[in-house]
Amino acid sequence: MDYDVKDLALSPKGKDRIEWAQQSMPVLRMIRSRFLRDKPLAGVRISACLHVTTETAGLAVTLRDGGADVRVCASNPLSTQDDVAAALVQEYGIPAFAIKGEDNATYYRHIASALAHAPHITMDDGADLVTCILTERKELIPHVIGGTEETTTGVIRLRSMAKEGVLKFPVISVNDADTKHLFDNRYGTGQSTVDGVLRATNILMAGMRVVVSGYGWCGRGVALRAKGMGADVIVTEINPVRALEAVMDGYRVMPMDQAAAVGQLFITVTGNKGIVRKEHFEVMRDGAMLANSGHFNVEIDIPALESLSTSKRRIRDFVDEYTLGDGRKIYLLGEGRLINLASAEGHPASVMDMSFADQSLSVEYLVRNHDRLQNQVYAVPTEIDHQVARLKLSSMNVEIDSLNADQRSYLASWNQGT
Ligand code: ADE
């Protein structure tokens, strides 16, 4: 079997951790049992470019049990769990191409390897597979029936491809499912980002001035959890509605020019570039820490930080100390890459359960419906979203009401008044 992982000897540990995660993924387990029985993905070749974690392994195995031929590669050079990559190969027979800390050349070589079986379906977290197919591997386009996309940044790119008319197959935006972003982005990123910062630094959050840049679902989650641990949270935003929401949620809101001078820990979650940059480093307090939880490592202007620095050293795992010309020290966590996956383990399994249930059911939907779809970005069908929510509730033993006939008719009417 073709694969490239750090060390196959790590696979027993990876298998145990994958089994542990599966305990908290009841919805995915139910889908997997049905897939095993019905084989809805028989003969479907899937390339999955995702963070290679215990939860992703659960997804890959579900797709494989549905009959798919799955190849997995990393969607970020620092997010791979090497024991999981080894277990995918050794224990589950799934080709994996991912090594934590891989350089850029290896990262793109791994993407090429994941595409080597000419996929019918691409599964992206950041749109790298689709980008590679549309730019460098155009000969693969005729094989592809569709793709899925996991994250906000990827969806933004895909929409711009669709707008320019260069997208050559339909893609389902899993990120836009309510059962994805309301939970994974908010509670998953919220908890795992704080987890990543704490594992990297062991700082006390209580009393710390934490600047959260971006008040989308991820930023809301990070701010909420930091506040819950006693931090004094400042939010920076460019969207006036989101800024207003942050104010009414109880945070101080100000431009980065002001926040830069007072913040002690900066966490970027905007999906944009150059959020913390030269003029901000110039006014930061000695000892300021910078972390990013957005998809790409462009939110903190690392080249500008390097250019202002006279020296740099790794002071702890995942913490680089930059000494500036005037002697101030600034600490960059996780090389400015997704801190929740670089120094921690990403979102907990119970939230990835819903995201990856959405992924599995979206793949099944693509297999059944691709010939009716255009080369556009599609939302996850509401039935899938509701099905995932219902299964999750039932796994939690939570029951809810349903409309009676009278209520249904009331909602459908316009002439029943007081
Ligand atoms: N993205 C964030 N957390 C993740 C996880 N645990 N597995 C896969 N992708 C993720």
Image (cartoon, helix red, strand yellow):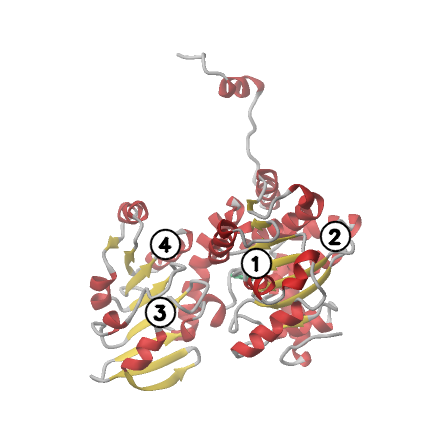
Q: Whole-Å distance between the Cαs marked 4 and 2? A: 39 Å
The mark that comes first in sequence, 1 or 4, is 4
Q: Nearer the viewer, mark 2 or mark 1?
A: 2
Name the image quarter holding residue 299.
bottom left
Q: Whole-Å distance between the Cαs marked 3 and 4? A: 22 Å
Residue 242's spot in the image, x, y percent?
32, 48
Classify mark 1: helix, strand or loop.
Answer: helix
Contact between marks 1 and 3 (CB within 8 A): the answer is: no
Q: Which residue is mark 3?
A: 300
Q: Which residue is mark 4?
A: 224
Q: Which residue is mark 2?
A: 41
Q: Which mark is residue 306?
A: none
Task: Name the residue nearer the viewer: 301 or 86.
Answer: 301
The mark that comes first in sequence, 3 or 4, is 4
Assess mark 1: CB under 8 A from ligand 1? yes
The mark that comes first in sequence, 1 or 3, is 3
Q: Quadrant of the C terminus?
A: top left
Residue 244's spot in the image, x, y percent?
27, 46
Q: How many circles with numbers are drawn on the protein?
A: 4
